[in-house]
Amino acid sequence: MNGRSIKKLTSDKALKKSLDNGFTKSNHFEAAARVFALYKKATKMKPEKDRNSDPNILSVKRFYTDFKLKSGKQATVKITVKETKQNGHTIYSVELLKK
C-alpha cells in the first residue's frame, strides 16, 4: 500500500459507498484501519478487466469477507485490489455492504 491507496480508502467517494449502505463514517474507518487483516481472510471473486480499459491496469480483483464491527453490527466488506504494470497488486478501496 502506498500514500495514494490510503487516500483512496479514506476518500469521500469510498466513504459515501459505505454511508449509502447504511453504515457510519466511524464504521467505514474501522474497516479501513483493519483492511490488511480483512484482506487476508477474504474470498477472491473472478478477476475483471478495468472498466475504463486503462492499458496500465492488468486486472481488478474484488475480495469479500464478513466483519463484525465494534458496535456488534455485522457487515460484509468488499475490498478492491488493482494490479497495475507499475505497482503490481495494490489495495484500492474498501466498502461496507449490508450482510
Image (cartoon, rainbow, N blue to C red):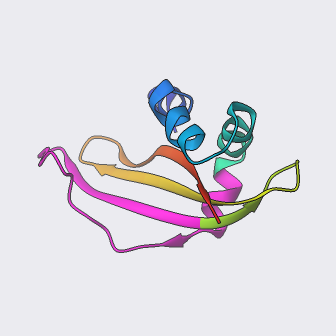
> Which x, y percent locates residue 93?
48, 43
Q: Is residue 26 left or right of residue 70?
A: left
Asked whether residue 53 is drawn in magenta, I would say: yes
Instruction: State the image coordinates of residue 70 (x, y, percent, origin top left).
Output: 87, 48
Relative to 31, say whether 14 is above or below.
Answer: above
Where, quadrant-wise, is the C terminus in this rendering? bottom right
Position of residue 32 measured from the top left corner of the image (x, y, whole percent):
65, 41
Q: Residue at the location (20% across, 60% down)?
A: 49
Q: Residue at x 51, y 54 (%)?
A: 79
Relative vertical location of residue 47 with respect to residue 4 in this rendering, above or below: below
Q: Quadrant of residue 58?
A: bottom left
Residue in view at x 69 percent, y 35 percent: 29
Residue 16 in the magenta stretch? The answer is no
Residue 42 or 1: which is nearer the viewer?
Answer: 42
Q: Residue 42: x and y, percent? A: 60, 68
| Residues rendered magenta in the picture | 36-64
The residue located at (26%, 64%) in the rendering is 48
